[in-house]
Image (cartoon, rainbow, N blue to C red):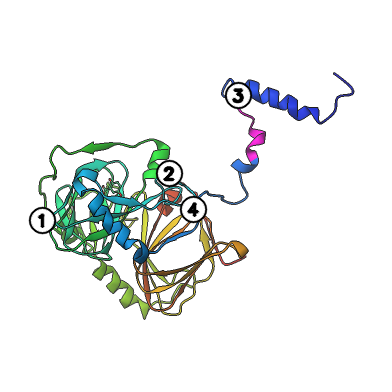
Amino acid sequence: MDAHKDLADVPNEREEYYAQIQEHNMAPLWENLSHLLTPEPKVKSVPHHWNYEALRSLLLDSADVISAAEAERRVLMLENPGLPGNCSITESMYGGLQLIMPGEVAPAHRHSPAALRFIIEGSGAYTAVNGEKTYMEPGDFVITPSWTWHDHGHEGREPVVWLDGLDIPLVRVIGSIFVEHYPEERFPDGPPPGDSLERYGNNMRPINMLPEDLNSPIFSYPYDRSRETLEKLRNSTELDPYHGLKMEYIDPTSGGPAMATISTFLQLLPKNFKSEIYQSTESLIYSPVEGSGKVYIGKGKETKVFDWKERDVIVVPCWYPHQFETNEDAVVFSFSDKVVQTKLGLWREKRGNA
Ligand code: GTQ
């Protein structure tokens, strides 16, 4: 040992050592530990707001750029500014706005990631899941479970737009991505339109049905029904100071979430409501259906404030404190990875500033 060795030399020696171990695909944990394990979650995605009115005409222009058939799915992805090029709206979720024009068909395929549609505007379009058509109206929440055949079509007269939510980033991390294209444009017609809702949507199930599927057998949760529930409950239920009147869409055969990997919600925030500061580990994507207001996301000087109204999309990343404020009665749809986190024992929330 050299007794005169300057301490400042040590890092150099370490660098040499690091270079040596790197050749063997090894790395020193001690250089990474503090950003690997943080006292609180630190994600790359950032709070963001898409103003639908401002981007609508650009979205409609996509119909002149490519047909739904050529595109397979004509979607403008909503990419989180903190995750450029990642096809992700949050760490775990994908979001996009899909446009279909009268007469178009988006051909049948199936994939392992699950999809939800939340209808933004227009009517006359349908999604067919395993051959069962579901006609979509604004505010409807429609499910395409993992590995079910689905095609979209449009029998109406005006552009139809919906918000796509898929668990692609989550499934991509695990690696289990599969897609298959159906040899024909459309999957053959199956049960009549609305069959799944009639069969399972009234708190009954066939006596021989084993609730073994992780997804709801209902493909469509129509807005008028969900809205009616919120309206009926508003007078008889005390508002939650953090969530207003927030309900979760469920699989009626199991009582669990409607989808295996995506939690979905609809909430009523009455006029002049201001929610208390709330944060949770789920990354949330909000899409207001009615009303307008402000949302505050983040802490102190970093807080972002967005003015929102119906049809916009708002992202609240993992562990960001946020508060909603309304100018009028508002109804807001949202989805998140809560169901996955809960199943894995990872979900946490924090109410208030404490
Ligand atoms: O409609 O099947 O936004 O497969 C992305 C991938 C929609 C769909 C998306 C898809 C779809």
Q: Residues within 10 Å of mark 1 (few under 14, many from 20)?
A: few
- The residue positioned 40% from the left and 77% from the top of the image is 270
Q: Name the residue tied to disc 2.
A: 85
Classify mark 2: helix, strand or loop: loop
For the residues marked 3 and 4, what is the alpha-carbon distance in whole angstroms? 35 Å
Quadrant of residue 286 within the rendered picture: bottom left
Q: Which residues are magenta?
A: 27-33
Residue 309 in view here: yes
Residue sticking out furthest to the top:
1
Q: Residues within 10 Å of mark 3 (few under 14, many from 20)?
A: few
Query: Residue 193's x, y, as percent?
Result: 13, 57
Type of the residue with mark 1:
Pro
- Residue closest to the eye, 54 or 275: 54
For the residues marked 1 and 2, what is the alpha-carbon distance in whole angstroms? 40 Å
Query: Residue 90's x, y, as percent?
Result: 44, 51
For the residues marked 4 and 1, what is the alpha-carbon distance in whole angstroms? 39 Å
